[in-house]
Structures are given as structure tokens and as C-alpha cells.
Image: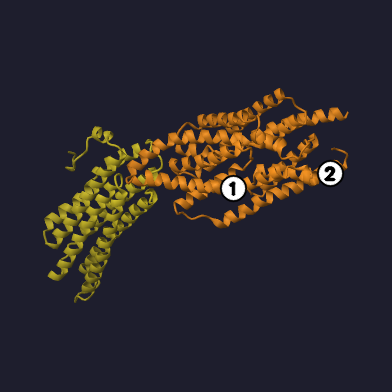
Amino acid sequence: MADDLTSILVIVLIVMAIALAFSIGANDETLSALVVAGVLKFKLALFIGGVAIGAGMIFFSGGFVAKTVGSDILGEGITYTTIMLLTVLISSILWLVVGSFAGIPLSSTHSLVGSVVGVLIVYAIFQGGVNPDTALNWTKLGNVVLSWFLSPLFGLIITFLLFKLIAKLYLSRLKGLNQIELSEKHFKWLLLVGVIFAEIWVGANSGEALGILYGLLDNGSLNLTQYFTYSIICGIFACVGIYFAARYVIRNLASHMVDSRPSEGLIIQMSSAIILMVATILGLPISHSHVIVFCIIGMSMAQKKEVDYKALRKMGIYWVLTFPVAALLAGILYLGFFSFGFS
Amino acid sequence: MSENNQIEIDEKVLKKLNIDELTHLFMDNINEQNLKLIEGIESLVEENFEKFNNNMKYVIKTNTEVQIKKQFESKIFKSKLMFSKADRLKLFTKINDIKNIGEFIANKMLLYRAVFPDEEFKIHIRNILKSLKIISNKLSNAVKLIGSDLSIARDVCEEIKEKRRKMRKEEWNLLNRLYNYDMDYLSRTFLYLKELIDNIMMLADHIKSFSEYIQFLATKYLIFD
């Protein structure tokens, strides 16, 4: 009976991981800059973006961020149980849904990692035999949390410097509107390359779905072939998510971006892609939306435009709260499961 | 040539022109009408009423710019311009406004034939008209520079604004003089002369506002170090 329940839970977790992959694609706004530039027809842009994000997810599923979330942040000898993974997923989804209804943009990455911490601390305290100090790999977790602060900061700095460099070497020499239009027409093709590059790393750094699957691989619920099969399915569903669901987000965002230039979009996308690439290679799950926001701020600062620090402060508070709130929520949820005999 | 002795532009020639060239052609056309209007008013000052009438009627009846406008409108929405479509459309609209103001002034000028009070008044009117001609030509240059060098266009616009400030002083001198003449203030002459000054300044104000828009475009599009 317990085995049957575990099997059912594994299936539920796989389905939820695939659904998460779909939602990662559905919420991705990277293609907005491409749509504004009018480089490709809308559906073709969605398809190419979808393929890129799916490819990133699939080709980097063998380790990197998936391994960090699914195994490395756990303590020595600790593996996820199916109930832990279920709690982590439910808790992070719940917090994101609350945030959506409240109109607050939250990071799914922070929410997931926070939930993992909450679950493991409760596991260590209540299930006994595990020291909370060793339930988690605090060094790895520390690096992950540090990356959440450093990645947006580096995004801002890289965007600022990249813009200043390109402005000094090239953009400032364009004096007439005709020259500017022509140069931006060339930039839009570079933007296509930049967005595809960014989408690959967005997929590669999406540790939520693949982290769950890696956790199942690590605890023996899946074998390697099954893991890679479901990773490919996740990649496909991320692609499907962008094609069928993200179009509304992208269209909405694009309508607010009509004055932005392809050159600006390229700098922002390349900066965020570089940050995501480095973070992925180091196996650090970071928030793409946070990085993009700070890249946009970096661009505004470089262009000496006003930055809405009040809105930023408000966003920052929610960003900082996500981790502890998700941890608390997951901890309570896991305690509830544990109380009812599920562990 | 059409019935009204207006020069019509060959449609085939217009079709070959791009958005920028159509804008320049439109600007040239409107500026030419503007200069005709100003020269017409100068003729009124010189009491050359025939030339005055001919020039006012020219400004009212000429509609060559309609052809250019139609061609521009058919091209702008189909064009592959990335982000400057709305601004170029606004530019075109502002140039068209000069024509509308010019036509309004020409119609008003034809309502009555006034005689100027004295030589001093004529000298001041000639000065203000000379300044109007200068800023009209400068605006035409600035519009043509938008495509090639917005920074020079911005500088030209600054000169327009400076000139218009001086025109404002000339306006006060004229009005001061007008109010101090020994004439019935409800007379048609007084009203006509007052409106003449107001109309000249209305056109100058539009040119000034247009030049501020061009400066805004320079700030918007130029990347400064």
C-alpha cells in the first residue's frame, strides 16, 4: 500500500514538474523585445523562442541547476522523499498564486528553494536523527542566496557598462533620424540572436521543474533514462507554454515597449543572458525576472533616465520576503503531512 | 497645370519618393506658401494692393500639398520604419498646421483694406515680417536636417526661439504704438491692425512650438556621452 502511494505520488510529481515547465514557458517575457522590433512574424518568434527555451532545459538537464536544487543543497546523505518534493511544489505554487492574486511579481526560484529549506528544517527537527546543521548543505545554500543578490547587481553593472561602451563607440556617432533607423534595423537582427541566446539560458537555469525530477532521480524513484525522457518532455512543454500561453504576456508587455529600440533590447538581453549563463555553469538557480529588472534599471541609469526607486523598494521587500515566507509555508505544510503520518 | 493655375506634381514622381523626401517636399511647398503670405502682407504695407490680393488668394487656393499629403499617408503606414513612425506623422501634421494657419490669416487679411497710420508703424511691421521670414526659413532647414543631423537641427531651433523672443518685443512696441494712436478703438482699422499683429505672432508661436518639438526629438533620439 505504501509502495502504491509512493508510485502515485511519483506520477503526481512528474505531472506537476511537467506543468511547472509549461508555466515557466507560459510566464516568459523574453520574446517581448523581439515582438516590438518586428523581426519575425509573431507565431514564428514564439516557435523559435519556445524551441530555444526547450533546448536549454533539455541540454542542461544533466546537472547544473537541476542537480543543485535536486541534490546539492541537501545535506550529506539526505535525499528527498516524495512527500518532501510534493510539499515543496505545493508550497511554492501556493505562494506564487497568492502573489499573483495580490498583484505582486514573485520569483518561482526563490519560492522553490525557500520551500526546500522549510521542509528540510522541519524534517530534521521532527523526524529525528538528523542535525539541522547537516540537513542542508549550508555552504551551497549560502552561495545560492548570495547569487540572488549578486546576479541582479551584476546584471545592472554589465548593462550599464555595455551601453556606455556601445554608445561611445557607435551610437553617439549617429546624428540623423534616418541613420538611427537604419542602424536599429541592423540591430534587430542581432537582437534575434541575443533573444535566442537568452532563451536558451532561461531554459537552462530553470531549476524548478528539473530540480524536482532530479530529486526523484536522486532518491531512486526514477532511473537515468526516465529522468532524461521526462526532462525532454519538460523541455517540450516549456516550448508549448511559450507558444500557446506566453503570447498574451508577451503581447501585453510589447504594447508598453513601443518606444524601445532594438539596440537597447539587445544590450539588456545579452547582459541577462551572460548572467544566466554564468549562474547555470556554476549550478546556481537565479531569478531571471530579477536580473531583467535590474538590467533595465542599469539601462535607465546609463541613459540618465529616472528610476522609480519607490516601486523598486516595494518589489525588493517582496523579493526578500519570498524566501522566508515560502520556507515557513512549506515547513507548516510538511508538519501537517507528518502529523497525518505522511513522510 | 490645373484649372486654378496650380502646379500639379506628377503622381509617378511622388510615388518614387520615400517618407523623408515627401516630408521635405511638403515642407518646401508649405514654406513657399508661407513666404508668399509674408510677402503679401509686405505688399499691403507698401500699399501694393494688387500683389497683396494675389498673394493672399494664392495661399488660400493652392492645394498642391494635398497630393503630397495623400502620398505620405499611403506610405507611412505601410513603411518598415521601426519606431519613428508616430513622430514623423506628427511632424507632417505640424507642417500642415502652418498651412492651415496661413490660410486662416490670408482669409482674414482679405476682409478689409486698412491703411497704416504712419511710416514708423510700417517700419516696425516690416521688421517683424522680416523676422517671421527668417524663422520660417530656419524651420524649413531644421525639418530637413532631422533626417541627417538632429544636433544641428536642435541648434537651428534654438536660433528660432531666440528670434521669436525678439519678435515678442517688437510685438509690444507695435501694440504700444497702436494703442497710443489717436483713433477710435472700435474702428475697423484698429481691429484689423491689431489682428494683423496677433496673426503674425500666432504663426511665429506655432513655428516656435514646432521648433521645440524638433528639439524634443533630438533629446529623444540622440545618444549623448
Q: Nearer the viewer, mark 2 or mark 1?
A: 1
Q: Quadrant of residue B205?
A: bottom left
Q: Quadrant of residue B43?
A: bottom left
**Location of residue B78 with respect to A141 vertically, above or below:** above
Amino acid type of the residue that numbered disc 2 sits on in the rendered structure: Gly
Towards the viewer: A195 or A278: A278
**Location of residue B130 with respect to A7 vertically, above or below:** below
Relative placement, left or right, of A307 versus A103 is left
Is residue B96 at all visible to an observer of this figure? Answer: no
Towards the viewer: A300 or B218: A300
Relative placement, left or right, of A60 versus B199 is right
Mark 1 neighbour class, 10 Å CA radius: few under 14, some 14 to 19, many 20 or more? some
Towards the viewer: A223 or A265: A223
**Location of residue B72 with respect to A311 vertically, above or below:** above
Residue B120 image position (x, y, % from top left): 14, 70
Residue B178 image position (x, y, % from top left): 21, 72
Q: Chain of mark 2?
A: A
Q: Secondary structure at mark 1?
A: helix
Q: Secondary structure at mark 2?
A: helix
Amino acid type of the residue that numbered disc 1 sits on in the rendered structure: Leu
Quadrant where the image shows the N terminus of chain B: top left
Compute the Cα span from label 2 to label 1.
Answer: 35 Å
In the rendered picture, chain B carries what hue? yellow
**Chosen colour scheme:** by chain
The residue that mark 1 highlights is A150
Specify the chain shown as orange: A
The residue that mark 2 highlights is A336
Towards the viewer: A329 or B36: A329
Residue A305 image position (x, y, % from top left): 46, 54
User: Marks 2 and 1: CB-CB under 8 Å?
Assistant: no
